[in-house]
Image (cartoon, grey):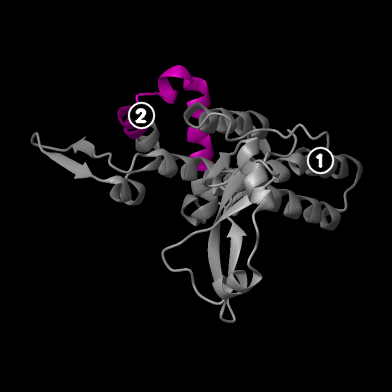
Amino acid sequence: MKHLVKKYVRAFDIGQKVVDVLNNAPVDETKVAELSQNNLEGYYGMLQYDDDRLIQTFKYVKDDKTFLIPEPDPIVIYFDTARLYHKTINEKKINLFKQLHISNNIVAVNGDFYWYYSTVCNYVIFLFLAVEALINKIIPMDYEYKKPIQEKKVEVYNKFQIQRHIEFIEKIKTVLPDALGKNFVVNHTHKFEDLRKLKRFRDEIVHTKSHEAKMVQNYYEDLYTLSLDFDFDQTLKSAQDFINFYHPDLIEECNCGNDD
């Protein structure tokens, strides 16, 4: 997969007439300087980008000066980061087993696996972040999730509470179909299973546990074995399809001709 088209929290295409007005509008440098010296409370800036687009910026104050920075969509950043780590996973795995086949130098092989597993962890964590961020983003602001509990009672969650207190799989299987009228699980059952496996792997990494209770010496053998057996290619594609199912074309490969 090639690098992705940058996406922003808010962006608007503008016509040529608007472009002409903006390009020819006089700029009061004094006023611009004054703006940079206050915190712009209650305002946000739009930046003219590629001539025919406006993109939203966020404010950052440093040394009593306010800077406007383009506000990217973190979902795309997280996914693209996972994509970059994914590119090197297979290469590192091939090198690892090449060393295992031709050498008994365990010290050298240890270095190969060390960096392989590090790359795997980054891939898993950032890909999961992309999926989870997408879920939380697309829940409508005014939506209420009515969750049945025992004795015919119902608990009601607003968007903030859903993000904080409803479990990842429940959001996918129940909340999103109810809130948006689209059901990824029904339409793409196998791809949903890939996301479920990604969640389990992420949990094993983030909440790494020692298996001393199993009375074995290899405390982390199951975790390391999973890192060697996991289907990274299919999971990346399933995550892309999930994101684009609910937010069409958010994960979009760039057609500039450059790989990265």
What's the mark number on residue 91?
1
Question: For residue 257, which quarter of the picture?
Answer: top right
Amino acid type at mark 2: Leu
Q: Secondary structure at mark 1?
A: helix
Question: Is residue 148 part of the magenta span, yes or no?
Answer: no
What's the mark number on residue 47?
none
Q: Locate residue 113, reporting x and y percent.
A: 75, 50
As measured in the structure, the alpha-carbon distance from the residue carrying label 1 to the one carrying label 2 is: 40 Å
Q: Locate residue 220, reporting x and y percent.
A: 59, 51
Residue for point 35% across, 27% down: 177
Quadrant containing the N terminus is top right
Task: Between residue 256 and residue 214, name the one nearer to us.
Answer: 256
Relative side of 225 to 201, left or right: right
Residue for point 24% across, 45% down: 157
Task: Between residue 199 and residue 113, name the one nearer to us.
Answer: 199
Relative side of 207 to 15, left or right: left
Q: Earlier in the sequence, mark 1 or mark 2?
A: 1
Q: In the rendered image, is residue 147 in sight?
A: yes
Q: Locate residue 252, reporting x and y percent.
A: 65, 33
What are the residue bounds of the magenta stretch? 174-201
| Dot 2 crowding, Cα within 10 Å, few <14, some 14–19, many 20+ | few
Q: From the viewer's perspective, is the residue at label 1 or at label 2 nearer? A: 2
Residue for point 71% across, 41% down: 86
- Residue pointed to by mark 2: 180
Residue for point 57% across, 75% down: 34
Q: How many discs appear?
A: 2
